[in-house]
């Protein structure tokens, strides 16, 4: 079972009257709005979170790497044993394929994993963290 995690989107996104259903169809993903953390119970199960605890949530952050203009530090939390994590990206949210990033070896600090995207060139890049639970 695999789940893709991304940020929630508002009901109407972008120009031209695109709505959530149209965007879901175009991206091939299901975007679910859930009260509380914004993460579905299915996602929480796969990610190893507690669906009854509103503070139990998956986080993802992007930061610049000092002195490395074309690199980004990607951190996510929590990393749970028995799960496989991979990061994919693309430069356009509406078109193109999600491809694995050219990343450094993962570095874990407690439940937080950090990977450096060594190819974060360009002005825009969209990321997905794919979580797989066997």
Image (tube, rainbow, N blue to C red):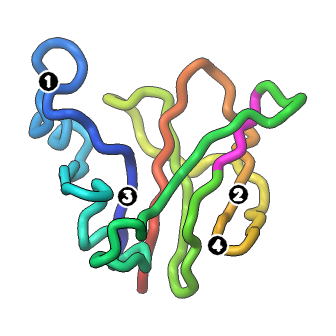
In this rendering, would 125 be left or right of 98? right
Between label 3 and label 4, give the one nearer the viewer.
4
The percent coordinates of residue 119 (x first, y second) are: 71, 36
Quarter holding the C terminus is: bottom left
Between label 2 and label 3, give the one nearer the viewer.
2
- Give yes or no for residue 72 being in the magenta stretch: yes
Residue at the image point whose x is 36% and y is 70% from the top: 2
The percent coordinates of residue 70 (x first, y second) are: 76, 28
The percent coordinates of residue 50 (x first, y second) are: 36, 79
Q: Give the numbered dot on residue 111.
A: 4
**Against 35, is 79 above or below?**
below
Q: Quadrant of residue 92?
A: top left
Return the residue at label 3: 4
Return the residue at label 1: 18
Tag 4's secondary structure? loop
Dot 3 alpha-carbon crowd within 10 angstroms: few under 14, some 14 to 19, many 20 or more: some
Q: Are marks 2 and 1 in contact (CB under 8 Å)?
A: no
**Along the polypeptide, which appears first: circle 3 or circle 1?**
3
Return the residue at label 2: 114
Q: Give how far apart the Cα atoms at labels 3 and 1 are.
A: 21 Å
């Amino acid at each position: 079972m695999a789940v893709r995690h991304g940020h929630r989107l508002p009901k109407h996104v972008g120009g031209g009257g695109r709505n959530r259903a149209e965007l879901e169809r175009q991206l091939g993903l299901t975007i679910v709005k859930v009260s509380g953390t914004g993460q579905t119970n299915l996602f929480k199960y796969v990610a190893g979170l507690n669906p009854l605890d509103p503070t139990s949530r998956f986080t993802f952050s992007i930061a610049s790497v000092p002195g490395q203009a074309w690199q980004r530090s990607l951190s996510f939390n929590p990393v749970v044993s028995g799960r496989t994590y991979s990061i994919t990206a693309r430069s356009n949210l509406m078109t193109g394929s999600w491809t694995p990033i050219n990343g450094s070896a993962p570095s874990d600090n407690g439940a937080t994993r950090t990977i450096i995207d060594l190819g974060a060139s360009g002005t825009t890049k969209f990321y997905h963290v794919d979580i797989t639970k066997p």
